[in-house]
């Protein structure tokens, strides 16, 4: 299994893979601040890396990622008050994903996996799956879509040893230990450890206020400490997640 990226295949190669029943992965990320030490594209990069890793394990194809996502929220992404955070309206995101699913189905694909790398996308990707089925299900009753947030495949038993002070939860992990470790493993040239902040964990009320004000968000944009980040942690998390997603795909779809 060599190339998995659809954008790097000829149409004939892609058509053959789809005819063989390949599962198609669509990574969905965000363009969003990730603290001073990480680039804006982390969520799209990591969801694409995970999709590629899982696709290699199950003979899948990875469609070109969506590099934008739904509006950043203070309590899980630091919010919209940072330069560079560039977000979509929900209807745009839903429509984009529904358009891509419709096209994949037209090509013959029947198994689609949305690999979400940005917390705030979750329910809009769900809506895209729901609307895609309502639109396409009658003519293609064998269409199946999976929506997943990739970090959920990394169980607490894997994370616990990496968090001697206790795991703060995935929402506060924005630009923190998990994402920084994965970036150190997968894109070390894009991580500036000299700028690693030691903020947080951020303390928020249990409600959100609009318009967003950035209240409660540390100035760095990082919601909990990234101090313990390590490339070897990133490798363990990445390989765990890829294997977990591949296993879920084998269980959920009629694949080899
Ligand atoms: Zn992120
Ligand atoms: Mn995000």
Image: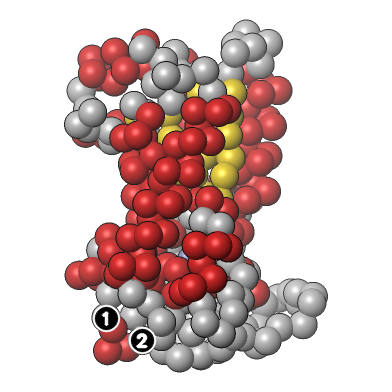
User: Observer-nearest residue: 39 or 98?
Assistant: 39
Position of 148 relative to 211 (above/below): above
Dot 1 beta carbon under 8 Å from ligand 1: no
Q: Is 179 on the left-hand or right-hand side of 70? A: left
Position of 143 relative to 223 (above/below): above
User: Observer-nearest residue: 130 or 96?
Assistant: 130
Residue depicted at 34% across the width and 26% down the height: 59
Residue 31 x, y percent position in the rendering: 43, 62
Residue depicted at 79% across the width and 75% down the height: 207
Secondary element at tag 1: loop
Residue depicted at 52% across the width and 39% down the height: 114
What residue is pinned by disc 2?
A: 196
Residue 228 x, y percent position in the rendering: 41, 82
Residue 195 figure quarter: bottom left
Residue 149 x, y percent position in the rendering: 56, 51
Badge number at residue 192: 1
| One can see residue 130 in this view | yes
Residue depicted at 77% across the width and 82% down the height: 205
Quadrant that contains the N terminus:
top left
| One can see residue 85 in this view | no
């Amino acid at each position: 299994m060599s190339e998995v990226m659809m954008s790097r295949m000829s149409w004939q190669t892609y058509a053959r893979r789809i005819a063989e029943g390949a599962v198609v992965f669509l990574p969905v990320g965000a363009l969003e601040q990730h603290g001073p030490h990480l680039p804006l594209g982390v969520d799209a990069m990591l969801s694409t890396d995970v999709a590629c890793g899982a696709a290699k394990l199950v003979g899948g194809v990875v469609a070109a990622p969506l590099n934008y996502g739904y509006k950043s929220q203070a309590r899980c992404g630091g919010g919209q008050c940072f330069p560079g955070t560039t977000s979509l309206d929900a209807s745009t995101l839903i429509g984009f994903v529904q358009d891509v699913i419709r096209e994949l189905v037209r090509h013959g694909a029947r198994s689609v996996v949305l690999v979400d790398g940005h917390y705030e996308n979750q329910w809009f990707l769900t809506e895209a799956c729901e609307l895609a089925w309502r639109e396409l299900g009658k003519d293609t009753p064998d269409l199946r879509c999976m929506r997943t947030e990739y970090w959920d495949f990394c169980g607490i038993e894997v994370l616990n040893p990496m968090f001697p002070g206790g795991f703060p939860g995935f929402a506060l992990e924005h630009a923190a230990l998990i994402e920084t470790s994965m970036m150190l493993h997968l894109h070390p040239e894009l991580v500036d450890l000299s700028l690693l902040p030691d903020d947080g964990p951020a303390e928020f009320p249990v409600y959100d206020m609009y318009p967003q004000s950035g209240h409660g968000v540390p100035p760095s944009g990082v919601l909990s400490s990234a101090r313990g980040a390590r490339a070897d942690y990133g490798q363990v998390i990445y390989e765990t997640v890829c294997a977990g997603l591949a296993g879920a795909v084998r269980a959920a779809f009629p694949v080899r």
